[in-house]
């Protein structure tokens, strides 16, 4: 029988950041990726705090990050980077695990990297 073990949010956050830092420098480099991680972490917490719906919050957060990158690509509002999408995914996933660990549904979680 399969037993589900709770994976600590702190470990998830650490593993996500470590994985991103170990990526090639042309994919993941610079302070910008930490901002993408942080904003995605915060957006997920806000979305989950309002809706209480984990899958919806996950999709909304990733959708906002994807929309931003597509805007960079097609509207020339910035530079499209796959590393930004990976940092968004890491921040969203880390926030999801963090929100699973807290007893109450947080309205706002904020990952400080500034």
Image (spheres, rainbow, N blue to C red):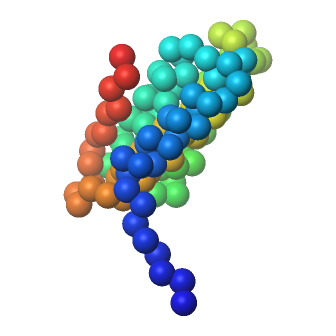
Q: Is 77 on the left or on the right of 74, as rendered? A: left
Q: Is 23 rendered above or below residue 80? A: below
Tell me how many marks there are.
0
The residue closer to the viewer here, 45 or 90, is: 90
Furthest residue toward bottom = 1
Residue 13 placement: quadrant = top left
Tell me residue 7's x, y (percent): 42, 60
Furthest residue toward left = 104
Quadrant occupied by the C terminus: top left
Tell me residue 1's x, y (percent): 54, 90
Q: Is 74 on the left or on the right of 25, as rendered? A: right
Residue at 42 percent of width and 53 percent of height:
97
The residue closer to the viewer here, 29 or 108, is: 29
Residue 89 visible somewhere in the drawing: yes
The residue closer to the viewer here, 9 or 46, is: 9
Residue 108 placement: quadrant = top left
Residue 48 visible somewhere in the drawing: no
Tell me residue 43's x, y (percent): 42, 36
Residue at 48 percent of width and 81 percent of height:
3
The residue closer to the viewer here, 1 or 57, is: 1
Residue at 52 percent of width and 26 percent of height:
36
Q: Is 112 rendered above or below residue 108? A: above
Residue at 51 percent of width and 14 percent of height:
31
């Amino acid at each position: 029988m399969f037993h589900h073990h709770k994976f600590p949010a702190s470990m998830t956050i650490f593993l996500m950041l470590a994985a991103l830092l170990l990526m090639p420098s042309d994919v993941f480099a610079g302070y910008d990726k930490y901002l993408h991680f942080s904003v995605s972490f915060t957006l997920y917490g806000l979305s989950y705090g309002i809706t209480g719906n984990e899958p919806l919050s996950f999709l909304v957060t990733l959708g906002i990050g994807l929309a931003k990158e597509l805007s960079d690509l097609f509207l020339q509002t910035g530079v499209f980077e796959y590393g930004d999408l990976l940092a968004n995914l890491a921040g969203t996933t880390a926030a999801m695990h963090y929100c699973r660990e807290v007893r109450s549904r947080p309205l706002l979680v904020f990952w400080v990297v500034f």
